Every structure is written in structure tokens, then in C-alpha cells.
């Protein structure tokens, strides 16, 4: 992404954690591969029914090795500051229960963010609390002028 179209200012340090009583967010990376794969692959229909995922190519059938490549890409995007993907962990910190994607708002060019999130089908009660926590976090701790969270809950 050229400097004139930077997603976040160079001086901004993306947060590495969001801790709530119900879940913890941390940058998604290769270390989450097996738990991430188990989480989304057990919840494909629930994710597809989650606002922001209808009509998208993911989730789709893939191997654990393919998932690892996806996670490596998300980690590179985070490091390059072109997109920020967070895993959603149970409070104990090892069980993946969802994911949050923070990407540039398409066609915006003005510091806007497009946000999507999902949780596992067996943790569906976290959809609303996750959306509210992330929405507040983005408004208070991030430099975005505009946040468009996939409509829903």
C-alpha cells in the first residue's frame, strides 16, 4: 500500500490485546493454526449466516496446511499494517472461539475501516458482546475516521 494510502498512521501502534471478561483478542498467527482450524471448520454454516460473510469465498473446505498459509498471510498483513486480524480466545487464552478482521474500507482512502467478526456456533451468545466490545475498542483506541462493522446483531 503506498504511503499516501496508509491504512493507519505510521505513528500508530496497533493494539496487541483486548481483554474482556468473556474473551481475549490477540493478533492471529501461525501459532493458532490447529485451534483456529478446529474453531471455524466446526462452525461453517454459522459463520456463513453471520453478517459480513454471505457471498464470500470463505469459509470453504481447506486442509490444515492451507489454513496455516492463510494465518501466515494474516500475520504478514498485520506486520505490514495493511490489515489487522485478531483471534478471539476464551478467557483462559488457549481455545479459539472466533475471529475479527479489520481491513481498509473499500474505495474509502480516507482512514476508514471495514470490520467483520465471527464466533463458533457453540459460542453464538458471544456474537453481540464481541461486536459491542470491538466497536467500542475501534472508536476509542484506533485512529479510524469511519468504521463500518458488517451490519447485524
Image: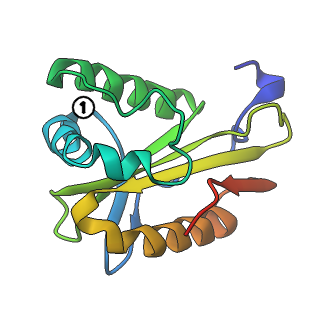
Q: Nearer the viewer, residue 54 or 128?
A: 54
Q: Is residue 133 left or right of residue 118?
A: right
Between 152 and 108, the one lying in front of the other is 152
Q: Residues within 10 Å of mark 1 (few under 14, many from 20)?
A: some
- Residue 133, position in %: x, y? 51, 72
Above or below, comparing residue 119 to residue 137 in the picture: above
Q: Nearer the viewer, residue 146 or 141?
A: 146
Instruction: Report the residue at 69% width, 20% height from top.
Output: 1
Task: Determine the residue positioned at 69% across, 66% down.
Answer: 139
Q: Residue at x 24, y 31 (%)?
A: 30
Quarter assignment of residue 95: bottom left
Residue 45 image position (x, y, % from top left): 33, 47
Decide if residue 69 is on the left or right side of residue 77: left
Circle 1 sits in a helix, a strand or a loop, which is it?
helix
Q: Is residue 86 visible?
A: no
- Is residue 107 placed above or below 151 in the rendered structure? above
The number of discs equals 1
Q: Is residue 19 visible?
A: yes
Q: Quadrant of the C terminus?
A: bottom right
Note whether 48 is above or below 118 in the view shown.
above
- Where is mark 1, residue-wise? 30
Amino acid at each position: 500500500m503506498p504511503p499516501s494510502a496508509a491504512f493507519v498512521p505510521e505513528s500508530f501502534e496497533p493494539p496487541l490485546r483486548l481483554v474482556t471478561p468473556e474473551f481475549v483478542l490477540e493478533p492471529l498467527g501461525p501459532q493458532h493454526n490447529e485451534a483456529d482450524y478446529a474453531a471455524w471448520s466446526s462452525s461453517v454454516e454459522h459463520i456463513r449466516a453471520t453478517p459480513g460473510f454471505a457471498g464470500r469465498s470463505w469459509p470453504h473446505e481447506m486442509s490444515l496446511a492451507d489454513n496455516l498459509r492463510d494465518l501466515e498471510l494474516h500475520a504478514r498483513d498485520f506486520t505490514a499494517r495493511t490489515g489487522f486480524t485478531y483471534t478471539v480466545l476464551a478467557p483462559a487464552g488457549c481455545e479459539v472461539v472466533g475471529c475479527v478482521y479489520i481491513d481498509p474500507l473499500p474505495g474509502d482512502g480516507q482512514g476508514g475501516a471495514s470490520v467483520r467478526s465471527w464466533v463458533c456456533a457453540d459460542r453464538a451468545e458471544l456474537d453481540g458482546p464481541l461486536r459491542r466490545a470491538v466497536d467500542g475498542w475501534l472508536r476509542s483506541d484506533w485512529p479510524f475516521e469511519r468504521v463500518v462493522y458488517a451490519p447485524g446483531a
